[in-house]
Amino acid sequence: MPTASDLHKERVEIAVNIWGEILNGSVSTRRELVELLREAYEAGKIEPIRGKTKIDIYDKELATVFLVGKHGLGLDEELEKVRDLFGVEYAANTVLERVMRGEDPRKAAEEVFEKVDENTVFRVLRLAMTAVALGFMLEDEFLKVLLAFEKSFPEYAPNFLGFKRFYIAYKLAESIARGEVRNRIEKEALKHAMCLRLGSEKAAPPDWLVREIAVKVLKVPEHKVNDALSLVRKRAKGSRKEAAE
């Protein structure tokens, strides 16, 4: 059965190669780093970890490069020297560590970031989710962090619902890739269980989002995804309806 590292082997290899470029002085700005990541992904036909949105997606995907450097390669000292390249991720990780120690998310974010807004909050949560996806963080730890942020930032309730939907869709896609979910019954059971764990039945993701992540992000063969989801005709109809909404 594929592990987290197996599912993201190519992604991690690209991150390691990019760290080689960073350490030899070939990258001097965050913009250059984003472009280097984009070119590497496009050459390898790899999609960033994402849901339906692609806004600033390669900038957000720098979370992967940061985490591979910090936890995969143990480059803590080197990260200190290139903080300008990973300013967002460095700050997000600082907030994440403080929240994991029990601090209030709002207080931690306000003390670390110059400005705390919707983007700030979800950059922290994206870093945490990426850490789970890559096997650097336990899901139980992530869920505690997510629920703590949700409690601390009630003004972003709709955004938290969307983020939960994205996370559940990713976990369903991951389970299909691992062979843990092989049919619609198993998919529906896991989806319901995940909704309960996140405390929101409304966070159930549509099949088209699970398909998008499974096929494009995790590169699961379409026939395998079709077995776990609804029929192609039914899915397509649902997708058109949801797109209209």
Image (spheres, rainbow, N blue to C red):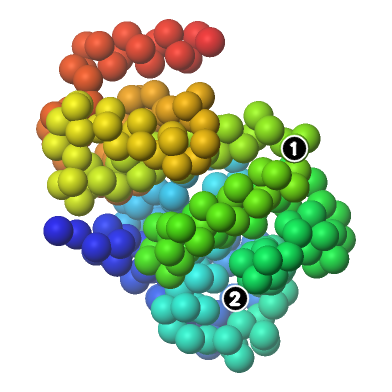
Query: Seen in the image, is 30 located left or right of residue 236?
Result: right
What amino acid is found at the position of numbered circle 1 in the picture?
Pro
User: In which quadrant of the rendered view does residue 84 lie?
Assistant: bottom right
Identify which residue is drawn at 22% across, 11% down: 233
Q: Would residue 40 be seen by someone viewing this image from the given angle?
A: no
Quarter of the figure with the N terminus: bottom left
Observer-nearest residue: 240 or 39?
Answer: 240
The percent coordinates of residue 182 (x first, y second) are 14, 37
User: In which quadrant of the rendered view does residue 170 lie?
Assistant: top left
For residue 216, above or below residue 20 = above
Identify the residue under disc 1: 154
Observer-nearest residue: 50 or 85?
Answer: 50
Separation of marks 1 and 2 at Cα, in angstroms = 39 Å
The percent coordinates of residue 125 (x first, y second) are 60, 53
Provide the secondary structure element on which disc 2 rests.
loop
Identify which residue is drawn at 39% across, 63% down: 134
Tag nearer the camera, 1 or 2: 1
The percent coordinates of residue 179 (x first, y second) are 15, 47
Observer-nearest residue: 198 or 52?
Answer: 198
Labelled pair 1, 2 in contact (Cβ < 8 Å):
no
For residue 234, above or below residue 194 = above
Identify which residue is drawn at 28% across, 28% down: 188
The percent coordinates of residue 151 (x first, y second) are 70, 44
User: In which quadrant of the rendered view does residue 157 lie?
Assistant: top right
What amino acid is found at the position of numbered circle 2 in the picture?
Val
Which mark is drawn over residue 27?
A: 2
Observer-nearest residue: 228 or 20?
Answer: 228
Query: Seen in the image, is 100 located left or right of residue 112?
Result: left
Identify which residue is drawn at 43% across, 28% down: 204
